[in-house]
Image: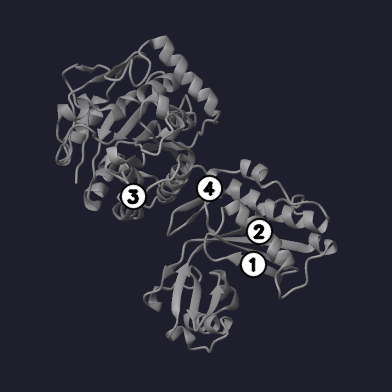
Amino acid sequence: MLLFLSCHSGSGEVRTSVLAGSWYPGRADELRATVESYLREAAQQPDPALTTLIVPHAGYQYSARTAAFGYARVPKERFRRVMVLSPSHRAWVRGAAVGPFDAYQTPLGTVPVDRAACESLLKDPLVKENRAAEASEHAIEIHLPFLQVILDEFTLVPVLIGDVSPENRRALARLLARHLDDQTLVVVSSDFTHYGERFDYVPFTAGSVADLRQRLSAMNHEAADLICGRDADGFDSYVARTKDTICGRGPIAVALEMLPEGSRGELIHASTSLDAMPTTESSVSYLAISFSTDSEEVSVMPERGFSLPESDRRELVLLAREVVTRRVSGLPGPDLEEWKGRMSPAVSRSAGVFVTLFADGDLRGCIGYIEGLKPLAEAVADNAFSAAFRDPRFNPVEKAEYSGLSFKISVLTPLEPVKDVSEIIVGRHGLVLSAQGRRGVFLPEVPVEQGWDLTAYLEHLGGKAGLDRHAWKRATLEKFESIVFGDELLSEEEKK
């Protein structure tokens, strides 16, 4: 369990660049033009509520495009200081460590270190001084040209962090958070999955570059879901289970503990080194993730950290309505690729989904997948069609009915076994009961709407499966949670 910090006072020593001319251009004019070009291509709007970025630290030819998607979100006039949380790649240090440098130099100029903040950190027993850890570390320096172009003038608090125990992680997070203010941006430096024998990590064998991309994408999105959901313990468990070679796992976990209440995470961009060097032998993944504290409500699946911004939820409701209105009007179905282009990458991930229709408050159709069979946008479209036209309990929806329909979408977390019924929280957990070849499902809101306590919930679930009311005592039970949203996100005009 390692922790590394770097900053100190007094010597006036400047750390010169170890990357210029190799990892990024060595001439100031070329470097500035390169950074500005990446930022223009990212075409992101600055986020005035931004607090934290997770961005990659490989050579610019591999990772700068993804990093730019994060940095383009930085408002130019807000921040006067940047705290960079980075892993230590080339030096092993027990506990915490700081280097002796008072400034960092790149071809774009010199960035002063906030020595007062560093001296304060050194008073804590977690923090010690170590020159070697910082002197050759690329994962801090690689970010400075982007910051120099965007912020012009700022001070730096460079922090090196290794793997930390949950106790030390929380203690370090509290220590670092005491040095944050509204003018300090937190930058977490991390690449993601390092795949291949050269990294001693081959969890699967890919048959082609396309196959490798798909498998890596699934891993990266699973990790990103937990990170965006601010689930530090879940992220720890993911790394322990998969052995995923995320070099900045320590800094990421600490940063998650530092986030203000109400923070929302968003995966902005993802890529791999396969874009520059397509091969099945090895690959490194790069993600850009932002955290903001603006007032826009964001729903998060508690158990998997799957964030779904309000803008995506609105579009999914509109998509469900579009599927039904086009069908009753005799038109072909909507262009799903066009719809997905309006939304964030979250809608490309697979998840269980139910679409429910109501007419004058009464159920008019409900169909869904309990588990993630298709990407979210496609699943919503499929189940909107099925709820309107294939629910065997109802006749197909007709055109004259459409204006009186209301829509609700439930996006589900993966199923988890119920070890003891005391785990079940009525109103939070949906349930799946399986026994004697039969299956019954209730969404989390059903027992609340019906006024059931836990016992009644379980007994009615057995009835839903076509079994007796005591069936839950001998059945397999699984639980899930859900994000629920619908027409309340739309204007009256959008519902027509």
Q: Which amino acid does label 1 sit on?
A: Ile
Label 3: few (<14), some (14–19) or many (≥20) C-alpha neighbours in 10 Å: few
Mark 3 vs 4, N-terminal side: 3
Crowdedness near tag 1: few (<14), some (14–19) or many (≥20) residues, C-alpha within 10 Å = many
- Going from N to C along the chain, the mark reached first, 4 or 1, is 4
| Residue type for callout 2 | Asp
Q: Where is residue 491 in the image (x, y as percent from the top left)?
A: 72, 50
Image location (x, y in percent) of residue 248: 31, 40
Residue at (17, 34) in percent of width and height:
97
Mark 2, other Cα within 10 Å: few <14 / some 14–19 / many ≥20: many
Label number found at residue 320: none
Q: Distance between the residues labelled 1 and 3?
A: 36 Å
| Residue 293 appears anywhere in the view | no
* Residue ID for mark 1: 367
Residue 226: give x, y in percent of width and height.
41, 51
In the drawing, does residue 140 fall left or right of residue 119?
A: right
Find the distance from the CA under tag 4 to the CA under tag 2: 17 Å
- The residue identified by callout 3 is 203
Mark closer to the chain start, 1 or 3? 3
